[in-house]
Amino acid sequence: MKTSPPSAAPVRFDPLLLCAVLALVTLGLVMVYSASAVLAQDKLGDSLYFLKRQLTAACMGLVVMAVAMKVGWRKLARWAYPLLLAAIVLLVLVAIPGIGSTAGGARRWIRLPGFSLQPAEVAKFAWVVYLSYSLAKKREKVATFSVGFLPHLALCGILVMLCMLQPDFGSSVLLVFMLFVLLFAAGAKLSYLVGSVLLALPLAYVAIASSPYRMKRILAFLDPWAHRHDVGYQVAESLMSIGSGGVSGLGLGDGRQKLFFLPEAHTDFIFSILGEETGLIGVGLLVLLYGIVLWRGVRASLAAGETFGTYLGLGFTSIIAFQATVNMCVAMGLLPTKGLTLPFVSYGGTSLVVLMGAAGVLLSLSASAQPAARGSRGQSELREVAA
């Protein structure tokens, strides 16, 4: 009697991680409409303008996420150098007048038919992929200064310099943060990391002190109420927005600060509107969803069984956690304004598509992070790619 060969086990993605990401995207669509409808109607004559663009980006993000889940994270090793090169080219292009589009005093976008591309968001994704691949490839020499530390630091310096030309201080900080997270995870010497931070402090001071608008942000952070009608206006309005929400909020659509009081209500300060309209309950739900993404992302990363997969997962999880933490702290006056969006929630097409792509990579990791045999096979695949 012939027996049929066993069928392949179905691929199982982490349902909790998937639900948390989709819930954040859905919440973001609701809040973008609530925070931008009045502004869009007044300035553009269409209250749905920002919602329609964000919904389009969400649909594109779903496609990118599905492709990342289908293709699998191992294939990214082959794209490490092309992605990084593409990101550098885009960062150079956006700095060229006539190609890069200026808004709010910063040249951060490349206007294309139907949408705008923000190269810094692409650079974040490419930087994590490249670092993960490079550190996995050099894992036996990561502790050495000339091989494991200096080349990555120099390349990070190039990316930061290109971001600062825009200028984009928030993305620069994030790129440096990712470098240190992955170097630490890969086993770089702590003395190198601490020493480079100490050496960078004077440079950071010069970068802040030499820029009037960054000094204004520091003043607004130190005492927003003393500068209530000047540089601290945005932070003060944000604090009033969050504080007026109470426990249960004023109700969706009933927030007042979005009525031309709080600038950037649908982008950098959308957390403030969420706190005002949904209160402590809504904020708690948001934090819970980010906590789930952090928990399940780290879980999938550590269970990957491969060095490249572990670094990749830790990198993308750290981006989401870092941006969420910084954005919420800025809205509550706990950090100076950085210009980082609230992941999956703030208005911004490139950011949403890139982050959903990163979530797709994490889901792909969660589906392949079980048998140890896969880990050993993946290590050989990575060595073949490196060769």
Image: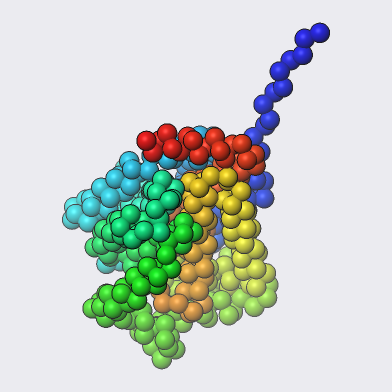
Query: At x 48% / y 79%, what residue is drawn?
Result: 333
Q: Within the image, what quadrant is residue 45 found in?
A: bottom left
| Residue 370 position within the rendered picture, expressed as x and y whole percent measured from the top left | 65, 42
Residue sitting farthest toward the left: 97
Residue 335: name its quadrant.
bottom left
Residue at the far top: name it: 1
- Relative placement, left or right, of 217 versus 236 is left
Q: Quadrant of the C terminus?
A: top left
In the image shown, does 115 or 152 lie closer to the viewer? 152
Q: State whether residue 171 is above or below residue 235.
A: above
Position of residue 209 in the picture relative to residue 267 (left or right): left
Residue depicted at 28% across the width and 59% down the height: 154
387 in relation to 260, above or below: above
Residue 376 image position (x, y, % from top left)? 56, 38
- Indicate how the structure is coloured in the image: rainbow
Q: Is residue 277 left or right of residue 339?
A: right
User: Residue 152 placed where, x, y %?
Assistant: 33, 56
Q: Name the residue located 65 percent from the left edge and 68 percent from the top edge.
A: 284
Q: Is residue 191 left or right of residue 327?
A: left
Q: Nearer the viewer, residue 248 or 171?
A: 171
Q: Is residue 154 visible?
A: yes
Residue nearest the viewer, comparing 186 with 175: 186
